[in-house]
Image (cartoon, rainbow, N blue to C red):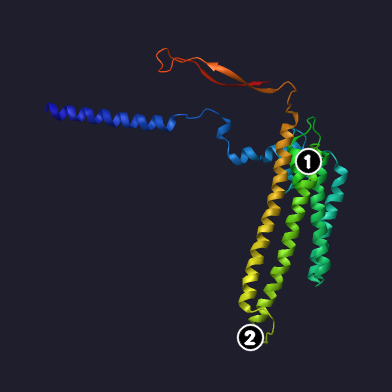
Amino acid sequence: MRRILAAIVLALLAVNASAQFKKDAFQQQYNDDKASSKDSVDVLFSFKEYFGGLSHKNELKIGTLFAGSLVFVGGEQIYNKQYWKLPIVYSTILGSLGAGIYLNTQGNHDAAKYCFIGAGVAYWATHFDGVISYKTDKYPLPGKATLFSLLCPGLGQAYNGEFWKIPIYLGGMGVAYYFYDTNNINYQRYRRIYKEATNKETEYTGPITADQALYYRDVFRRYRDYSLLALAAVYLLQVIDANVFSYMHDFEIVDDMALSITPTVLPPADQYALNPSPSFGLSLGLRF
């Protein structure tokens, strides 16, 4: 009987401890940082912060302003208090889009294409103007340098005062585009030859067989894709370069920094060492 009572008591204690553990586990605060409880998207971009900035209740970082204005076109001009530009922005973009849609429905596809291109250029110019007009006391501003390079390759380097880098990046992009264009021309050529060689309705008398045309078509298509990747890599590299070196703009290397290497004598580390005689070596010193 005593054993049964003891078992019941132990079971009740175990149930109570288990319930208390579960209660504490759900109520325990593992992180008291209120900022960490925010959603990551809300931290990266806040609509409340963005529209608060447009109403001039708070200041906006240039990255937040640019990201919001990608959707809400004209937001940059509103934040910069350049309201007179809004009719130009909307009339240019919407007018070009409307004209392109109308011409496309009328069958004039070439003119519609140029209208759509014009709308894209106006959209790009709106954001470019917003980045230029953004006022800040800090120079260089990393966000501004990054957006300059994003919108116009090489401009971020010019903003940072590193003009010597511009020919390198523009030259790299030019070379990559040259190979892209050349490989694309050859790809289209052998693609056309392969179609002609495999068309059973017409007689093909070309000097290249269908298998050879297929081989060269695949080779030049692969080279074309590699060239496009190289172009994108150089473009991305100059954006990263503008951002990184804008942060390092104030980093100074003083004139009295020096590295010295001198011979030195190393005494034995232990009196019970097998070799009690001192050792000779080099001492490395850095002064800054």
Q: In this view, does 228 lie above or below 43?
A: below
Image mark for residue 227? none
Q: Nearer the viewer, residue 266 or 39?
A: 266
Residue at the spot 34% in from the left edge and 32% down from the top edge? 19
Q: Is residue 281 above or below residue 158?
A: above
Residue at the spot 72% in from the left edge and 60% down from the top edge? 180
Image mark for residue 157? 1
Q: Which of 199 and 253 is in front in this view?
A: 253
| Callout 2 amino acid | Lys
24 left or right, relative to 250: left
Q: Quadrant of residue 135?
A: top right
Residue farthest to the top? 271
Residue at the spot 36% in from the left edge and 30% down from the top edge? 21
The residue that disc 2 covers is 200
Tag 2, which secondary structure? loop
Q: Which of 169 and 148 is in front in this view?
A: 169
| Callout 1 amino acid | Gln
